[in-house]
Amino acid sequence: MAQREALGLVGRPSSAEREALVLQVGSAIKVLLRLKYFSFEVEGTEHLPREGPVVYAQNHAGWFALDTFVLGHAVGETLGVSRTPYFAAHESALAAPVVGPFLQRLGGLPASWFRNPERLPPEIESYGICPEGVRGNCKPFWEAYRMREWSRTFVKLALVRNATIIPVAIFGGEECLPVAWTVKVLEPLIGSIVGLPLVPIPLPARWKVVFHEPVRLAAQANPSRPDRQYCTDVARRVQGIVQETLDWEAHSHPLAQLSSFVSQLKDRGAGETGDDDPDPLLG
């Protein structure tokens, strides 16, 4: 209860209040689409479960979590607003003035709750997680579409809730909200690294959401204490599915081409210095 009070979650909005805000955000996105400021494409909607527990696991980019809203918009437009996923948000974002209450009303829940899924509200069936965490949306633009290593949290959540996992690849966040630099100096104060915006406003972007075939998990004797190696293997497999899609479509995204070039330079430099250890932050 103390943690809920600290994060302002005691009075969590009702489903009707949340759905009303989700519709407002969706209307704003549609205005940007009509103005051709954004374009929007969705593939794989046939893979979306219309009922039952589901966990959407997506790549993450951009100095603000707009890609999370884009995912929610794609799901809501396909299945109805009631199936729009609740999403994991960093505690520092939820505690921030103005932004924090907005994220809570939209369906943001503390990331720490996802690490202990038993604490999540039992009535929620649809969840969205960015397994890269803040390392994903704080990476600089020259590392676009090169994912950070995924955590196992979403796999444990799926096991505890007996949920289907839907891998999701999202394009557009890097171009819309490019990060100039990863700021680490504030981490001791706010508990998180920060992505320094290259520009202070969202840029025009071509958004695309690709939903992949569902990943169903093997039954565990004790889902609340799942096998760590099994969870790691599943997380890597799902990450690989998403990364393959990002790589496949990289030719149409200049930042992805730049990122690939920078990655090749890094690999070449590591080879010349005899350093065979990969960067632990790269996916």
Image (cartoon, grey):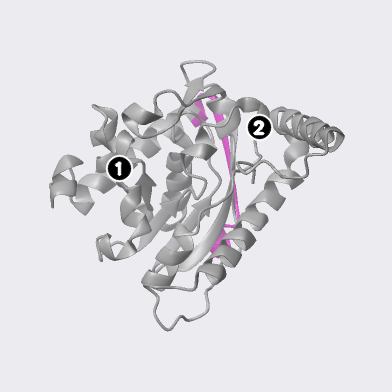
Outermost residue toward the bottom in this view: 221
Q: Which mark is residue 106?
A: 1
The picture quadrant where one finds residue 179 is top right
Crowdedness near tag 1: few (<14), some (14–19) or many (≥20) residues, C-alpha within 10 Å:
many
Please give the range of residues in magenta.
33-47
Left or right: 97 as drawn, with respect to 111: left
The answer to which of 264 and 125 lies nearer the viewer is 264
Residue where numbered disc 2 is placed: 143
Closer-to-camera residue (95/61):
95
Secondary structure at badge 2 equals helix
Does residue 55 lie above or below 74 as drawn?
A: below
**Disc number lying in front (1 or 2):** 2
Q: Which residue is painted at 46% across and 38% down in the image? A: 134
Residue 37 rendering spot, x and y as whole percentages: 54, 24
Q: Is residue 228 magenta?
A: no
Q: Is residue 90 above or below residue 166?
A: above
